[in-house]
Amino acid sequence: MTVRTTRFRQSVIRTVLGLAALSGLAMQPVESAFAKVVEVSMTAVETKLVIDGEGHTYDAWTFNGQFPGPVIRVQEGDEVVFSLTNPETNGRPHSMDFHAAETNFLEHYKEVRPGESLQYRFKAKWPGVFAYHCGASPMIQHIARGMMGAIIVDPKDPKAMPKADREYVLVQSELFKEPDDVDGMFDRKYQHVVFNGAVFRYDPVHSKAGGDFLDAKPGERVRFYFVNAGPNNVSAVHPIAEIWDDVWESGNPANHTRGVQTQLIPPAGAAILDMVLEPNAFHKLSGRYRKSAIKFADLALVGQLPTLKIVLGGSEGTGPFPQGKKVEFVKTPLPPPY
């Protein structure tokens, strides 16, 4: 993904939402200083990708060869100039639908045939975390085969949310053993529910090979940008033996809830979930509609505070994929703000 930014002075008036509104305080206007033009370029890539630590592969359709696609991060008020290229070597049309955009969908979300490109622009008016995905027909198949991802729009007001010590992006989706069986996708005949495109990607405990930990320490505020790309399952996100300290539905500071036990996130939905980790705690984030969990495993080290390891599992379905060669996962880190 190519990203280029251009800054220009823009004086605007915005309304402070979130905590001020929820506590009954008067909402005050704040003047913003800068906005940016952010140029984002992606290429549709049809390829095979490894989806577990044992080397099993998946016939994926992707943005830039990644499943899910690259994380895009902009600021509220930025203008995004997006370009999509569909190489002539691909076998089908593709497109891009940003849930963070208010735009002319007939013109901008239209299918791009092999050998063609499309460019459009939109203003990131609303802060939050949003899904993006290919909207070409059949849309459910393009999403299930990997053409989806997350776009984060940071609020213009730096005080709209408390500062997080750690941030993780989790994109939930479903893997289908028969990626050409569109009827089976509508019938929810998925093989696995995964996070960031791999089986047991963050669960070395249950994975036969591979898997990564997500790190956190006691007292830290850990922030999850959670996108449910679907295409079918609702996610019920609950931290066992813990409570979400702060939740923002769709990631918007105005949609702030405190002390949440379980957050429902529908397909094509998203939320920002914050947890301030208690010392000597053992946590697990489970989903009612999937056999998966985030688990904070207490690793006590002599002479220092224990480090909490966050483990995310994601296997559900009827059986394993065919055997393959053991390989390493390709990591999808959260990029810095552009």
Image: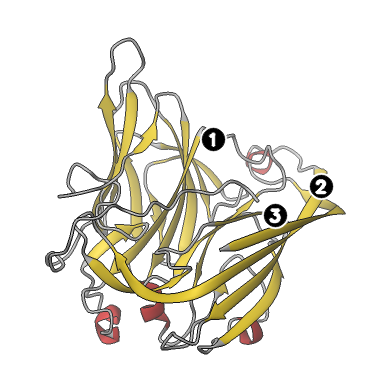
Assess disc 1: are there few (<14), some (14-19) or many (≥20) residues with their C-alpha within 10 Å of its C-alpha: some
**Where does the image place residue 94, in percent across and percent down from the top left?**
49, 82
Name the element at disc 3: loop
**Above/below status of 159 relative to 93:** above
Name the element at disc 1: loop
**Where does the image place residue 48, in percent across and percent down from the top left?**
31, 72
Distance of label 1 from label 2 (alpha carbons): 22 Å
In this rendering, position of residue 67 left or right of residue 135: left
**Where does the image place residue 46, in percent across and percent down from the top left?**
40, 77
Distance of label 2 from label 3 (alpha carbons): 10 Å
* Label 3 sits on residue: 76
* Label 1 sits on residue: 164
Label 3 sits on what residue type? Glu
* Label 2 sits on residue: 32
> In the rendered image, which quarter is residue 325 located in?
bottom left
Q: Do the residues labelled 1 and 2 touch (CB within 8 Å)?
A: no
Q: Which of marks 2 and 3 is nearer the N terminus?
A: 2
Distance of label 3 from label 1 (alpha carbons): 18 Å
Assess disc 2: are there few (<14), some (14-19) or many (≥20) residues with their C-alpha within 10 Å of its C-alpha: some
Q: Are marks 2 and 3 in contact (CB under 8 Å)?
A: no
